[in-house]
Image (cartoon, helix red, strand yellow):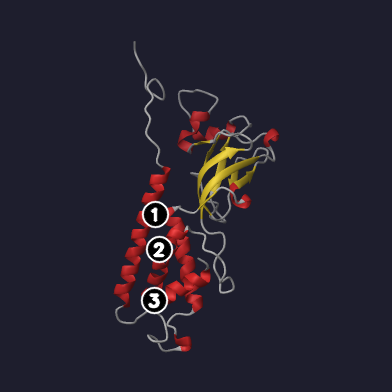
């Protein structure tokens, strides 16, 4: 649905905001500008709460250009989470690690490991990444850190990432033909939040109860979307003996 269709659905079918029920400028309780603001908020909130807006093809979002000796890269401001990463022409994904687990890829095997020594790994082809030190101070954007830092041979090569992100652009009154980026299955659900926002700010009798109903329907839709995502991403559990801490004694 495009913005014009979303705005019509919100005003006419959810808020019942028409000339028969209201009297005022343009016979509307809420201006188009106000409702578009609430639709933007609803789309952002649904994407953030569910991580359902996935992207693996938009170059400015999903491609990270490596530089010699640089291990951390601030990602596009729309990125909420990195699902996976792949180095240039390689087919296998990079290993995801956290600072607490970076010793897994250390070339050394000491009795103890200080995560600060991760920066001392010899530069080379990245084999792992993390996002747990994730917010850039200025932009609040997600930061991707690769291990080890790229050497001169890797400069200019790409890391391709799959991400969950926010919508790239916001709706405005000048973009009525712009399509919603969320899956069509969720577009009407997100309008429940826009209706909640609108009714919550109104003092008309009965609106507080109606606002609570819309909020609950939005919350229920979030929970349903999360169940669908978990089902799509689920994988069978596999046990392997003799590896990763399991040993056989003969």
Residue at 52% in and 48% down: 163
Which comes sooner in the sequence, label 1 or label 3?
Answer: 3
**Quadrant of the snapshot with the C terminus:** top left
Name the residue: 44% across, 72% down. 9
Q: Is residue 137 above or below residue 120?
A: below
Residue at numbered disc 1: 225
Residue in view at x 55 percent, y 65 percent: 170
Q: Nearer the viewer, residue 161 or 179?
A: 179
95 and 113: which one is in front? 95
Residue 37 makes an appearance in the image = no
Asked if the residue at tag 3 contacts the one at tag 1, i.e. Cβ–Cβ closer than 8 Å, the answer is no
Q: Which mark is residue 142?
A: none
User: SS of the residue at dot 3?
Assistant: loop
Labels 2 & 1 near each other (Cβ < 8 A): yes
According to the picture, the residue beneath numbered tag 2 turns out to be 189
Q: Which residue bears the numbered disc 3?
A: 15
Which is nearer the N-term, disc 2 or disc 1? Answer: 2
Residue located at (56% from left, 41% from top): 145
């Amino acid at each position: 649905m495009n913005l014009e269709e979303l705005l019509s659905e919100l005003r006419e079918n959810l808020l019942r905001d028409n000339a028969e029920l209201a009297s005022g400028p343009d016979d509307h309780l809420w201006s188009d500008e106000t409702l578009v603001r609430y639709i933007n908020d609803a789309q952002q909130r649904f994407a953030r709460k569910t991580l359902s807006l996935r992207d693996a093809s938009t170059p400015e979002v999903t491609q990270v250009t490596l530089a010699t000796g640089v291990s951390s890269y601030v990602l596009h401001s729309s990125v909420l989470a990195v699902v996976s990463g792949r180095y240039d022409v390689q087919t296998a994904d990079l290993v995801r690690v956290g600072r607490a687990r970076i010793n897994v890829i250390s070339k050394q095997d000491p009795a103890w490991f200080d995560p600060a020594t991760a920066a001392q790994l010899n530069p080379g082809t990245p084999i792992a990444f993390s996002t747990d030190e994730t917010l850039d101070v200025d932009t609040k954007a997600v930061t991707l850190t690769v291990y080890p830092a790229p050497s001169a041979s890797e400069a200019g090569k790409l890391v391709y990432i799959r991400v969950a992100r926010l919508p790239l652009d916001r709706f405005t009154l000048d973009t009525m033909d712009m399509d919603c980026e969320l899956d069509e299955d969720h577009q009407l659900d997100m309008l429940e939040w826009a209706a909640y926002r609108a009714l919550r700010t109104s003092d008309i009798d009965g609106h507080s109860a109606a606002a609570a109903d819309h909020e609950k329907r939005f919350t229920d839709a979030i929970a349903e979307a999360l169940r669908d995502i978990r089902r799509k991403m689920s994988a069978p559990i596999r046990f392997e003996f003799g590896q990763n801490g399991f040993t056989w004694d003969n």
